[in-house]
Amino acid sequence: MKKLLLQKRQFLLYCVIGSLGSTLDFCIYSQLVHSGLAHYQAANAVGYASGTLLSFTLNAWLNFRITDLLYVLIGAWGLNKYAAKLAALGVIVILQYNLNRLVSFRKTA
């Protein structure tokens, strides 16, 4: 029962945090487009990146209570800071590619 409650709590907090990220995305996009500071495509990229960064940070810190990959590679394993960053980027690129290929941009029948 305790595990079920924890899972529901995590899901609800995930939804709240996702809503905050989406709100930030929309606000930044709207402000950049409305003010004429950016073309709508550039504004979309900035808004999306900002919302994603906020969501990722809050979920890691508040919801899942984990440290980031760089902490593990540098702080726990003692790898070189530059090598660790390159390794983290490699992992992230592979994961994001596969998630996008399998979920976001999958072909429907």
Image: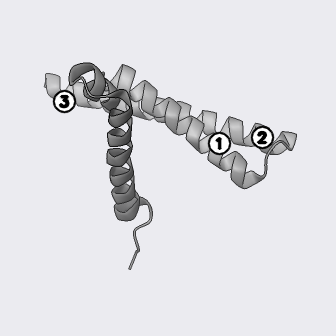
Marks 2 and 1 in Cβ contact (< 8 Å): yes
Q: Residues within 10 Å of mark 2 (few under 14, many from 20)?
A: some
Please indicate whether residue 102 sits to the left or right of residue 76 in the image. Answer: right
Q: Quadrant of residue 84?
A: top left
Marks 3 and 2 in Cβ contact (< 8 Å): no
x and y percentages locating residue 33 in the rendered image: 80, 45
- State which tag comes first along the sequence, 3 or 2: 3
- State which tag comes first along the sequence, 1 or 3: 3
Spatial CA span between label 1 and label 3: 37 Å
Please indicate whether residue 32 sits to the left or right of residue 78 in the image. Answer: right
Q: Amino acid type of disc 2? A: Leu
x and y percentages locating residue 38 in the rendered image: 79, 46
Residue positioned 54% across, 30% down in the render: 20
Instruction: Look at mark 3 in the image and give the residue it sits on.
Output: 4
Image vertical order of residue 27 relative to residue 100, above or below:
above
Residue positioned 66% across, 48% down in the render: 44
Spatial CA span between label 3 and label 2: 42 Å
The colour scheme is one colour
